[in-house]
Amino acid sequence: MSYPETYKFTREHEWVHPHGAEAKIGITDHAQHELGDIVFVNLPKVGNSVKRAETFGSVESVKAVSDVYSPVTGEVTGVNDLLAQKPETLNEDPHGEGWLIKVTLTSPEELQALMSSAEYEEYIKAE
Amino acid sequence: MIRKVSKHIVQNEPLLFELSSPGKCGYQLPALDVPPVDPAKTLGAENVRPEIEDFPEVSEFEVLRHFTRLSTWNYAIDLGLYPLGSCTMKYNPRVNEVVARTEGLAWAHPYAPEVLSQGCMEVIAALEQALAEITGMDAVTLQPAAGAHGEFTGVLMIRALLEQRGNPRKKVLVPDSAHGTNPATARMVGYAVENIKSNERGMIDIDVLKRAVTEDVAALMITNPNTVGVFEENIREICGILHEKGALVYMDGANMNALVGISRPGDFGADVMHLNLHKTFSTPHGGGGPGSGAVAVAKALTPFLPSPRLKRNGDFWTWNYDLPDSIGRVRAYYGNFGVLVRALAYIMAHGANGLRQATLDALLNANYLRALLEPNYQIAYDAPSMHECVFSDDRQAKKGVRTGDIAKRLIDYGFHPYTVSFPLIVRGALMIEPTETESKRELDLFADAMASIAREVENDPELVLKAPHSTRTSRVDEVKAARNPIVRWQPRS
C-alpha cells in the first residue's frame, strides 16, 4: 500500500492528513500490518483535546494493545464510529475508511516536524 | 521426531447444563422429623431466593467425571516443562502442601482472638522478616493478593510519601520492555505514564533516562532483570538519577528468581518492590493460585505500609491499627494466608544456601537452553541471559512461520508453549524460562523439539503453520472470538 503524499507521518506510525483548519488522524499501513488483526479501538469523545506526542486512544489486536499518539495538538471534532462495529476496517483501509479521529489544528506549525511519505517509507525500511 | 507424547486421550465433554435431566439429584436427605418452617416468614420474603431457572440437575458421579475429564484437557507443571517466560512456573514442593494443611494453620479463622492466633501471626512475622532479608529492604507487607495488586500498593505508598513531602508529582516512567501491568498501575494511582526506550542491548538508555527525569517524575517502575532476561548493569546509576531529583524507584519483582541469594534490590537502590510468591517462592500458580504479591519497602516508606501491622508486645504478637500515615488496608484480613505458609515452608526448607543454589541453577538452565537453541533461533540481544532467554522469529519468519506457529507446533511435541510475542520490543518474541526445577533430560527433550521444529520450518512449513495436529481442537479463530465474544452460555433454541 502506498503512503499518500498529502499525509504527514510520525515515528510512532500515525498519519495526519491536514485539510484547511482541520486534520484527520489514523495509523499507518505498516502499523496495522505489525499489529495484526485489530479487534477493538478505543477513541476519545468529540470535544476532548489532544496534545502532540500524547496518547489519545488505543488499538487492540489479538497480540497486543497499543497506545495511539497524536501527531498534532487540537480539539476532537469527529470520531470514526464505523470502527466500533467494524474494527477490521483499520486493517483493510488504514489510510482511508479506517481513520480514527478528526481534529482542529491549533498549532499548524507542528506539521513541519513530521515526516513526509518518502521519509516515512525510508524510516520503516530502516526499522 | 516427537519423543515425548504419543497420543493424547481426550474425550469430548458436554457442559453440565447439557448433561442435565429433570429430577436427577446429587444428594439424598432423610425424611423431615421436625415441624416444617416457612423461610419467607422467618427470614423475610425479600431474603428468599426463588428456584434458579435451568440449574443443571446431575448426579454426583456425573459431576465428578465431568470435571475429571475436563482436567485431562489441561497441561500442568506436574506433566512437564512449562517454559512460560516471566511466569517462573516451577515445581511446587509437596512438603509445602503438608505444612499448609497443618490443622492449626489450615483451620485458623481470621476473626479468632490474638491469643489464639499467635502461631499464625508468628508465620506472618517470620515470612516478613525472611523476605526483608532476601530483598535487602526494611519492612514487608503480605496483604496484596497478587503481583499487580502489589504494584498498586507500592505506588500508592510512593504517592503518599510524595504528598507528605508536599507534591505528589505527575508522571511515572516505564521502560518499553516493562510488563503491561506497570503502566496500568501508574494510571490507577493517578499518574501519567511516560515510556522510556531501551537501547540496542535491551537495557535502559541512561541518556534518555536523564532527559526524562524531571521534578514532575514521581517514580521509575523498573523490572530487573528486565523482560528480555537481561540484568540492568547500570542499576545503581539509574537509581541515583531518580533519587537526585527526589523521585523513587519501584522494582517489579516478577523476575526475582534470578536474584535471590545473589543480589538485593535494597542494596542497589530500589525503594519499593513486590515479590510474586507464586513465582519465586514456589506456591501454586496459573489457575492453581491464589497468588500473593508481597511488597517490600525501604525505611522512608515504612510509615505508609498497609494497616494493620504486627507488633511485638513482650512475648506476644498483637495487631497495631494505630498507623496515622498508613495507606490503609488493601485486602480483607491478612493476605492469602495459605500461600504465605507455603512460601515460608519453601524458604525454611532451602535455607540461605539452598535459595542461592536454586537461583544459580535457574541461571544455568536458562543459559544451557540458550546455548542449545542459538544455532536455530535468533537471540534477541547479545547481552548475557539471566533466568530466561528471549529469541526472535526472524529466521523462521522468512519462511512465513511466526512465533505463534512455532508455539502451536510445540504442543504436538508434548510441551506447553513458551511466552509468545512478549516483550513487545522484540519482533516475534519467543520468551523461554525453564526455572531451576527442570532436569537436564527434560531440557534436552525441549531443545530437541525446538530443533526439530526449526527443521520442519525449513522443509515443510505447512506442517508448522497448521499445528497443532494432536489436540482435540486445532486452531481456534482468535480474531472472531475477540471481535464477537460470547460470554454467556445460552440454551440451544
Image: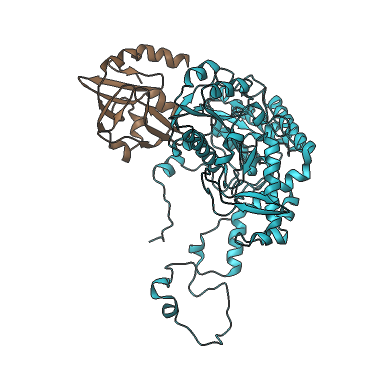
Chain colours: A brown, B cyan
Q: Taking A81 as reference, is B285 above or below it?
A: below
Residue plotted at (31% across, 41% down): A85
Q: Where does the image place residue B441, in percent across and percent down from the top left?
A: 76, 36
Residue B285 in the figure: left or right of residue B51: right
Whether residue B382 is visible here, answered yes or no, is yes
Q: Where does the image place residue B76, in percent across and percent down from the top left?
A: 65, 47
The quadrant in which residue B461 appears is top right
Work out which residue is located at the far front of the displayed protein and give it: B314
Position of the N terminus of chain B, as image quadrant, is top right
Residue plotted at (51% across, 22% down): B245
Q: Where does the image place residue B87, in percent across and percent down from the top left?
A: 61, 38
Whether residue B1 is visible here, answered yes or no, is no
Q: Nearer the viewer, residue B482 or B36?
A: B36
Q: Where does the image place residue B493, in percent across and percent down from the top left?
A: 38, 61
Q: Taking A50 as reference, is B120 above or below it?
A: below
Work out which residue is located at the far left of the displayed protein and give it: A20
- Count every numbered label the image shows and give the total: 0
Q: Nearer the viewer, residue B10 or B258?
A: B258
Q: Taking A1 as reference, is B96 above or below it?
A: below
The quadrant in which residue A12 appears is top left
